[in-house]
Amino acid sequence: MLIRGILAIARSIAKKSISSKTITEVAAAIHAGRLVILPATSGYIIACDSQNTSAITDLNLLRENSEEHILSMIFSSVSQMDSEVTIPNLDQETKKYIETGQLTLVLPRDESMRVSSDKYKELVAVNIPINPSVKKLLESSGPCAVAAAAIPGQGLPVNVKDISLRIKDGVEYILDAGQISGTVSSIVNYEKRKPIVSRIGAVPEETIKKLFPEI
């Protein structure tokens, strides 16, 4: 299936298991500064190279972001995440919840972080998608800056057909995983000295308090 997109068409790849060739093609597009749409745990997101300021600007323009907001990034693994941001000391059980896309952390941005944009607060939300093909893609492309595949105020689309034509027109690839029915991740926020729970989702509050006794 082909969908109109940047300069001509966005290639929509409707496969549960994405081939190595496709991963190579999409990773190359990301490295070239293009935007792509990926399946996340609870809906579709726009992604771009987290080191490419121009691509991040394009992402903000596509989504009509006009206000300061928290940078969101996705990673293939906790180890890849740890190479980009300073994460707290976490036990294996907590890392498992992060690795399976059930838990997102909001952390202060490191001074050494290569992402720079006036629109972002000095925070970064970090998450690992549950989709194994997306994890393989991130191993090849490196971490990505992401945002919902919708303009602010609209819900996260759970099906490619729910994504507006305007958003589709602004990307080069769409990885179509069909209907997404995953639960949103729970969020633990380290903006202050003491972490707080910003959102209850896939991980229940009582479990979060066991994982993070300082809450």
Image (tube, grey):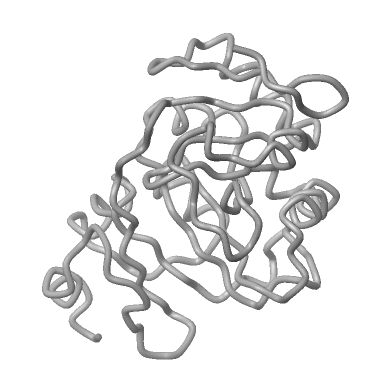
Instruction: Indicate the quadrant containing the N terminus: top left, top right, bottom left or bottom right.
Output: top right
**Image location (x, y in percent) of residue 60:** 76, 57
Quadrant of residue 15 within the rendered picture: top left
Work out whether residue 86 or residue 65 is closer to the camera in this orientation and state it: 65
Instruction: Indicate the quadrant containing the C terminus: top left, top right, bottom left or bottom right.
Output: bottom left
Position of residue 103 in the picture relative to residue 153 (left or right): left
Q: Is residue 86 above or below residue 42?
A: below
Quadrant of residue 129 within the rendered picture: top left
Work out whether residue 68 or residue 164 is closer to the camera in this orientation and state it: 164
Position of residue 21 in the picture relative to residue 202 (left or right): right
Q: Is residue 143 above or below residue 137?
A: below
Position of residue 149 in the picture relative to residue 77 (left or right): right
Work out whether residue 59 or residue 63 is closer to the camera in this orientation and state it: 63
- Tell me what residue is drawn at x 47 percent, y 31 percent: 134
Work out whether residue 182 or residue 198 is closer to the camera in this orientation and state it: 182
- Tell me what residue is drawn at x 37 percent, y 29 percent: 132
**Image location (x, y in percent) of residue 80:** 49, 46
**Image location (x, y in percent) of residue 41:** 37, 44
